[in-house]
Image (spheres, rainbow, N blue to C red):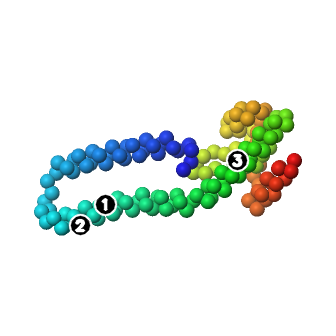
Amino acid sequence: MPRVQFYARLIMTIGLLADGALIGVLLSQAQPKIKHPVLRSVIVILFSLVAVIYPFRAVMRAWSEIPTYRARAEDWDKRDAIIRALAAQGETDLTVIQFDGVDGTKELDTFATHWVNRCAANYYEVKSIRAIPIPSEYIDEYFNEQSDE
């Protein structure tokens, strides 16, 4: 899950829990017209299964995306190390690798004056940072070249 969306999802989850609790209180006051206990149990089991399907699907989807996110995090950490090393060497105008944003998050831009780049430059305590796109087949070569320097 993207770090940026954590609080939004937390608020949404709390809201859904409150909705579920309120619906449970409302349904506990309702008198069911179904008197047969077996039929009532079947209906409860069906509703329970439907309620479990979506979270199970979401977990399976997130589980399948772990390798992709892990590889992205490793590349991001490598870029972070490169930026810190360049800043430690006294570089003030940095050009680094650009990654695609994930789930609507904004990554470093090609323009040093973009607000994300200005914030990153401020964070790393350098004058400017700009990012250039590199085709995915050359990313490993880029990192190897940077680590040799």
- Residue type for callout 2: Val
Q: Earlier in the sequence, mark 2 or mark 1?
A: 2
Number of marks in the rendered image: 3
Q: Is residue 148 left or right of residue 44?
A: right
Q: Secondary structure at mark 1?
A: helix
Q: Is residue 72 left or right of residue 52?
A: right
Q: Is residue 58 visible?
A: yes
Picture disc at residue 83: none
Q: Position of residue 137 (x, y in %)?
A: 76, 62
- Residue type for callout 1: Ser
- Residue type for callout 3: Asp
Residue ID for mark 2: 42
Relative depth, front residue between 107 and 60: 60
Task: Give the alpha-carbon distance from disc 1 to disc 3, as whole Å.
Answer: 42 Å
Q: Position of residue 111 (x, y in %)?
A: 74, 41
- Near mark 3 (Cα within 10 A), the count class, few <14, some 14-19 or many ≥20, is few
Q: Earlier in the sequence, mark 1 or mark 3?
A: 1
Picture disc at residue 77: 3
Picture disc at residue 48: 1
Q: Is residue 37 left or right of residue 136?
A: left
Q: Secondary structure at mark 2?
A: helix
Q: Secondary structure at mark 3?
A: helix
Task: Give the alpha-carbon distance from disc 2 to disc 1, as whole Å.
Answer: 10 Å
